Amino acid sequence: MTASKKELPDDIYIPFVETLFRDGFTLAIGITAQMALITLAWAKTGNVAFLAVVLVLLIVGLLRVGSMRKFAKLPAITTRAEARRHENRYIFYGAMHGAALGTFCLVAIYTAQDGFAEIAAVCISLATATGIAGRNYGSPRMVIILIITLTCPMSLGFILRGDFYHVLLGLLSAPFLLAIHRYADTVRDVLFTALSAEKRANRIAGRFNRALNTMSHGLVMLGPNGKVVVANAEAAHLMLLKSPDALLGRSVRSLLKRGVAGGLLSPKDCRYVEGQLTRALHEGRDRKVLVSLTNGQHYEFSARAGNQELGVITFEDVTQRVEAEEKIRSMARYDNLTGLPNRAYFHEIVGECMASGDRERLCALAVLDLDDFKSVNDTLGHPVGDGLIYAAAERLGNLVNEDVKVSRFGGDEFMIFFNRVEDESHLAGMLDAIFAILQGDVDVAGHVLRLQASGGAVLSRVRDSDADAMIVKADLAMYKAKELGKNGWRLFESAMDAAFRDKQLLKADLRSAVEAKRLRVVFQPIVAIETMRIASCEALCRWDHPELGAISPAIFIPLAEEMGIISEISTFMLHAACGECAKWPSPIGVSVNLSAKDFRRRDVVDKVRDALAHSGLAPWRLEIEVTETALLDDKSQTRQYIEEIKQLGVRIALDDFGTGYSSLSYLHKLPLDKVKIDRSFLMDVTQNSHSLHLLKGIVNLSRPLGLAVTVEGVETYEQLKILSLEVKPDLVQGFLFGSALSASGIETMSNTVWPFAEEMRVAKR
Ligand code: C2E
Ligand code: CA
Ligand code: CA
């Protein structure tokens, strides 16, 4: 596009109009010279028309120069219409000016016919015409009007002279006029192109500036000499400078020094940041440096080596991000409830403590576990349990110092690390003091609870141990303390370690024995006291360890419960017992012991049903023995499952009665068929009348509740006699009738009538 052909865009048209009003001074000089020359012509010729032209020029000159001066004082033109008004006024005065000069030329050449006047006229025409393009390129209309008003009268004057030479002269001015016109166009085009390019550049620069200054990052660009060549508003803001220009020409060092002077940056950090950034720029690598300011803000500086040796440094306020990260780190390190270091972080702390200082010194680690915490949680709810833990944490937290570290290890377990211990008695003193501080009543949400704990500790030379090993040992000692009656602490002894290792080995062996079905079932007869015949048998589990021999179920059953594999054993026992019993003559039945843990699982009912279906055993011949702990477990659906098992036609016996706390009236509400009185009641029954009374009482209370009674642990004839004559239970079980036998042994004995029967009858009489 060229300026001449099409309508100009506003942002170019307006500056073009402005150029028209630019040079009032040369215009004034020009008009003055024109008036002087015309005055001279008047003096030479005495033609009054010349005087009139001078007068008109004076008026026009004053108007034009006046309007230019007025224009200079006006605010900048903003609209096209405004510019158009100014241009029109300019054209109006310019046209008057041109017409006055043209009139002079016509009169001088045609009317006056004076040599001097002619020369003056040509001089004025030429001098003015040459200036047309230079002054008026901004307005194409003005150029044309001036050309016409100025030079046409001159040409006309020559042509009117009529002779060949003058007519030719008059006509020859036409190309000259065209040349001036073109010249003005060319000037305008050149300027238009320059102006357009400048506008475009300005537009780009404007956008760039805007982008740069609305960035949330601070940015400085460094020239090859390491001095700032570009900076944005955010950079100025951070450097506490008014405008980005104030950063120009400064070095990175001088900018960072401002931070030091303002107290935001320590001199050490300043040197570090400068070193990192300049190295990154030199090596042409990108690098990020995090800087923490003394006011708590965090900035991340990124150096990016650009091309043409321009380096860019951006910086960003990352305070929120850093704070969030710190929060997360602290959440990952500290226990939410107590604010104490958690397991992972404590591990780290202990590791650090043990890695530094004298490796020959003694250190110690103690584990504390709140006593009976589970029952607080179960009976009063978790919020109260949490309150108790919080109270314990508060008391323990007060112990923390440079050499004592405390952690909540999860649940109701706490760990204490003693970084420096003189000897065993020093440790004992500290632990006693801790127990004294910890113990006592606490009020949690209106409940007065007793805070009490058991602890285990291990003393070790730093060089000889590590955190993991110490934790394992302290744990073992703590279990020992619990075993020995709680509310105290024990120091680890190597015997505990051996016991622990043995237990681990035994567990592994048990697992493989269960998997390989290497367990056995034996049956102990249960005898009806009236007939002295086998009424049923109790299935008991046996494990013959390849090296250790027979292991008591009193040992491996709790182990299996701990390992979570008891349900496999129960399944095995149910199937084996039902299968064998089905081969025995009816009505001999079988009892199977189920663990409290079995009733934590929904599938317990299906298991019983499957075993019956699989063996074809009549349900009434199967009895399930459960303990009180299973019945009292509030967390499970135990009672419902027992009810469902009973619905199958299977009978339920309460095992080990008397060792728990239940009263008989409470048991009445449970779906039971039988109670098995624990053998501890029978032990001294022959010597102790109190025990006898108790036994009699239990039997007398059970009968009206519809419960059958078995007395376990009958070992002597004496015991049997007392039972038969005074207690009168329904069934008896014990070594007197034989210990557990194989299934076939039971089959053989199924018709046995024990010889005591006759003696009993005699005694009764
Ligand atoms: P329990 O259910 O009370 O079983 C009776 C235990 O008393 C058996 O011990 C039996 O051998 C023993 N016993 C029988 N008569 C006498 C006696 O006259 N005097 C003495 N001192 N003891 C007698 P065992 O077989 O060692 O079983 C111990 C415990 O192991 C059982 O006590 C039972 O709680 C558990 N248990 C055994 N087998 C299983 C099983 O298959 N599943 C489950 N869950 N527990 C089982
Ligand atoms: Ca039993
Ligand atoms: Ca028992």
Image (cartoon, grey):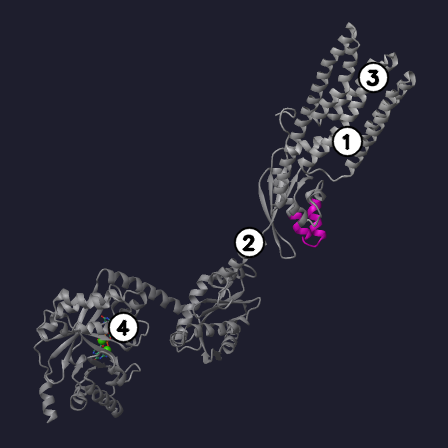
> Where does the C terminus fall, quadrant-wise?
bottom left
Q: Is residue 40 above or below residue 520?
A: above
Q: Position of residue 57 (x, y in %)?
A: 83, 26
Which residue carries the number 3 mark?
Answer: 107
User: Which labelled disc corresponds to residue 638?
Assistant: 4
Task: Determine crowd level at label 3: few under 14, some 14-19, many 20+ residues with C-alpha closer than 10 A.
Answer: many
Q: Which residues are magenta?
A: 253-272
Viewer-side residue, 242 vs 375? 242
Q: Position of residue 499 (x, y in %)?
A: 36, 68
Q: Position of residue 428 (x, y in %)?
A: 50, 74
Which residue carries the number 1 mark?
Answer: 22
Q: Is residue 436 above or below residue 146?
A: below
Viewer-side residue, 405 vs 639? 639
> Dot 1: what SS?
loop
Residue 152 falls in image quadrant? top right
Can residue 676 be seen in the rendering of this structure? yes
Between circles 2 and 3, the one closer to the viewer is: 3
User: Which labelled disc corresponds to residue 473?
Assistant: none
Tell me: is circle 1 under 8 Å from ligand 1.
Answer: no
Badge 1 or badge 4: first in the primary sequence: 1
Between circles 3 and 4, the one closer to the viewer is: 3
Q: CA distance from mark 2 to mark 4?
A: 51 Å
Between circles 1 and 2, the one closer to the viewer is: 1
Which residue carries the number 2 mark?
Answer: 321
Q: CA distance from mark 1 to mark 2?
A: 57 Å
Q: Is residue 726 left or right of residue 636?
A: left
x 24%, y 60%: residue: 515
